[in-house]
Image (tube, rainbow, N blue to C red):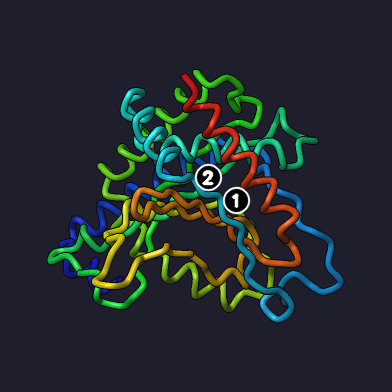
Amino acid sequence: MEKAIQRSLSIVNRGLSVSKVMIQMLYVMLKNRSRITKIPLADVDFPLIELADHGHSEASYGILNKEETQKLVNKCRQEGVTVTSAISSALLYAFSTLVNREHAERSVLQFGIVADPRRRYTPPIPNHDLCIHMSSIMFFILPTRDVPTTCAEMWQLARRLGEHTRRCVAANQILASGIFVGKFYSKLLDSTTVPDFGTCSMSSWGVLPFREQYGPWKFEGMTPILNMTLSFMPFITIQTVNGILTIMFGGNDPILPLNVLEPLRDCTIKKLHEMTED
């Protein structure tokens, strides 16, 4: 990934892009020095730094059928937002119901957004190149006390999320972040302490190019799964296959078991249903 970015950006553009990201990160950190609101991790009888040796990946799936998915798509068009922004809004609401609210007045939700840089390279890297390319944009920060409650406010939040994403993409954060994200994960693997983590992180895989029929074979569906053995916060993926929307809620059992992921899933799906009601 780093080599593809180097080929795509001149030395000057690389330096400018990274400098902008670093300045924006510093600005956000100084502006939002509040406590990060998190889902409390379950108590375990081993040091958290040994999580990969004792835990396993767990996932729960929220699904909208074709009719429900199309209803959500239509409502998003009506409201002028993307499906990803609408789901992100519902996710933030769901997290606000499960996190430790003891310090809600002085805390923020820190929402990470993972991005795919493949199509932004020069030249782009095709899907059949089986290599992970995972970059990101700036965290979306929302004070816990400002989490919306009405559907109108939920759609307003979706528009804010969409505008945040557009600004970050326009600032070339996807390629700039990819320059140092690999080094960050390398340090994480070598670290002897538990890293500070946000509220959650999300990746939208969009509408995937599958067909319902392949000769005599019927495509039943696709179930996402990720390796979460080094994760200290929930990770969410969004995908649409043949008109069916699937939201995966991933975590590391035993610190983020199914009895945490399932309420998160149910609350998100319920809120999406409420948001699409006329």
Q: Residues within 10 Å of mark 1 (few under 14, many from 20)?
A: many
Position above or below: 268 against 241: above
Q: Position of residue 248 (x, y in %)?
A: 53, 56
Quick one: which residue is furthest to the right in this view?
45
Please identify the quarter of the rendering in which residue 53 is found. bottom right
Q: Residue furthest bottom?
A: 53
What residue is at 57 percent from the left and 40 percent from the top?
269
At mark 1, the secondary structure is loop
Specify the quadrant of the image occupied by residue 92: top right
Above or below residue 149? Residue 103 is below
* Local crowd size for mark 2, using a 10 Å CA cut-off: few (<14), some (14–19), many (≥20): many
**Residue found 69% across the figure and 70% down from its top:** 193
Q: Residue at x 41, y 37 (%)?
A: 85
Q: Amino acid at mark 1?
A: Gly
Mark pair 1, 2: CA separation: 7 Å
Residue indicated by mark 1: 198
Looking at the image, tell me whether mark 1 or mark 2 is earlier in sequence order.
Answer: 2
Side of 60 where 3 appears, left or right: left
Under tag 2, what secondary structure? Answer: strand
Tell me residue 100's x, y (percent). Answer: 76, 41
In the rendered structure, find residue 111 and report the number of the disc placed on it. Answer: 2
In the image, 211 versus 206, the foreground residue is 211
Q: Is residue 36 left or right of residue 226?
A: right
**From the viewer's perspective, is 195 left or right of 248?**
right
Residue 49, compared with residue 61, is above or below; it is below
Q: Are marks 1 and 2 in contact (CB under 8 Å)?
A: yes
Position of 149 relative to 243 (above/below): above
Front in this rendered view, residue 204 or 277: 277
Residue 50 percent coordinates (x, y): 72, 77
Residue at the location (41% across, 49% down)?
A: 244
The amino acid type, in three-letter code, at marker 2 is: Phe
